[in-house]
Image (cartoon, rainbow, N blue to C red):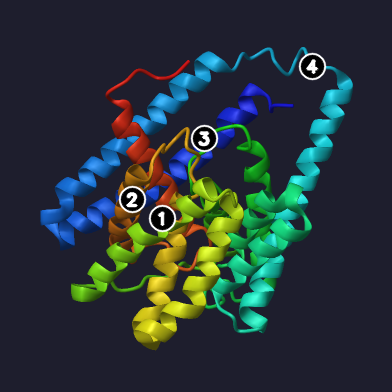
């Protein structure tokens, strides 16, 4: 059962606006700090806008407004039950991940990856919603100082998940964008200010871009070519990166690279219908790394920011390659 046209467009607009705001902030930061890269970032932003527009045009032609009005009552009842279940799984995933991350001091990346793997193993049917909630739970305890604030973010993200379940599918990072919309909204509701971190420079920046490309490609290969599915692939990359990279690169750079790898892994969750080969996934990983660098000073501490970066980067690649062919019917 698909949501009504009004609800679908609400979900589409929430995800689109959330992503565009973050990418515009990253672009402006690039213009001020590294103007040489501003041309490349302008291409990414252009691709994002084109991709969102193409998807909107496709949805307008493919989704008749009467589809819900003609549905049978049992179908409506099943849809409501499914929506409530999805909401609950997102909410629960947020709460569990935050507790595991903070109380067991495992860190946000490992906690989210573990919850994703557990959800895929024990509640496979609901793994996507649980993984989405886990990104809310990645919110920083330095920003969301009270557990109740995370629950507010989880509730809002659960609602956005239900609204957007039938739009912008197949783009890696969508789940994180849903979580980010919930976390940012909650920060306004409860009045907690989001943070800012310094932009990595020099060899640190190069490592970030390199791991971003690698993680995106590895995740896609695990998901598509090896048949593990997107949730398991991304969660596995997150756990391995979270445990291994701090050891390999030290306590200062390692955790940052783990975060970047997890971020890019979301681009690797993309469907082959969106990014049909590893080369394009690698480009999405490259875009993710560049956007990550110059988004650092903005909206830090809100869970789902990493997914939003991957989501916009994936749409940007899809939008750019789509300029050479018409929108599929």
Callout 2 touching callout 3 (CB < 8 Å) = no
84 left or right, relative to 15: right
- First reached walking from the N terminus: tag 2 or tag 3: 3
Residue 304: x and y, percent? 52, 58
Q: Earlier in the sequence, mark 4 or mark 1?
A: 4
Residue 91 horizontal side relative to residue 37, left or right: right
Q: Quadrant of the N terminus?
A: top right
Gap in angstroms between the C-alphas marked 2 and 1: 6 Å
Q: CA distance from mark 2 to mark 4?
A: 42 Å
Q: Nearer the viewer, mark 4 or mark 1?
A: 1
Q: Secondary structure at mark 1?
A: helix
Q: Nearer the viewer, mark 1 or mark 3?
A: 1
Disc 2 packing (10 Å; few <14; some 14–19; many ≥20): many
Q: Which mark is residue 71?
A: 4
Choose the circle earlier in sequence order: 2 or 1. 1
Label 4: which secondary element: loop
CA distance separating discs 4 and 3: 23 Å
> What residue does disc 1 label?
216
The answer to whether one can see residue 280 in this image is yes
Q: Position of residue 201 (x, y in %)?
A: 21, 73
> Is residue 188 visible to the viewer in this orientation of the structure?
no
Q: Which residue is found at the position 40% from the left and 25% from the top?
A: 54
Badge 2 or badge 4: first in the primary sequence:
4
Residue at the disc numbered 3: 168
**Residue at label 2?**
282
- Is label 2 in contact with label 1 (beta carbons under 8 Å)? yes
Q: Is residue 307 left or right of 319 when viewed as pictured?
A: right
**Between residues 38 and 281, which one lies in front from this camera angle?**
281
- Classed neighbour count for the residue bearing mark 3: other residues with Cα under 10 Å, few (<14), some (14–19), many (≥20): some
Q: Is residue 127 above or below residue 71?
A: below
């Amino acid at each position: 059962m698909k949501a009504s046209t009004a609800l679908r467009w609400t979900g589409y607009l929430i995800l689109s606006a959330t992503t565009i705001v973050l990418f515009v902030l990253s672009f402006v930061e690039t213009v001020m700090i590294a103007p040489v890269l501003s041309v490349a970032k302008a291409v990414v932003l252009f691709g994002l806008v084109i991709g969102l527009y193409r998807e909107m045009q496709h949805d307008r032609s493919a989704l008749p407004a009467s589809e819900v009005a003609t549905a049978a009552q049992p179908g409506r009842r099943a849809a409501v039950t499914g929506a409530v279940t999805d909401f609950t799984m997102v909410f629960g995933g947020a709460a569990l991940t935050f507790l595991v991350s903070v109380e067991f001091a495992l860190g946000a990346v490992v906690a989210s990856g573990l919850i994703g793997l557990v959800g895929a193993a024990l509640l496979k049917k609901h793994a996507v919603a649980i993984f989405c909630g886990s990104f809310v739970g990645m919110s920083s305890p330095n920003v969301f100082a009270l557990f109740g604030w995370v629950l507010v973010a989880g509730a809002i993200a659960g609602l956005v998940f239900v609204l957007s379940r039938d739009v912008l599918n197949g783009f890696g990072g969508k789940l994180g964008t849903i979580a980010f919309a919930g976390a940012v909204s909650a920060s306004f509701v409860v009045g907690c200010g989001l943070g800012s971190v310094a932009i990595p420079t020099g060899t640190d920046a190069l490592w970030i871009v390199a791991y971003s490309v690698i993680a995106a490609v590895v995740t896609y290969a695990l998901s598509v070519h090896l048949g593990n599915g997107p949730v398991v692939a991304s969660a596995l990359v997150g756990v391995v990166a979270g445990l291994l990279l701090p050891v390999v690169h030290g306590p200062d750079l390692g955790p940052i690279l783990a975060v970047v790898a997890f971020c890019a892994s979301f681009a690797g969750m993309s469907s082959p219908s969106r990014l049909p080969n590893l080369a394009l996934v690698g480009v999405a990983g490259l875009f993710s790394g560049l956007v990550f660098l110059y988004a650092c000073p903005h909206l830090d501490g809100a869970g789902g920011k990493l997914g939003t970066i991957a989501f916009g980067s994936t749409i940007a690649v899809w939008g750019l390659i789509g300029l050479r062919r018409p929108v599929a019917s």
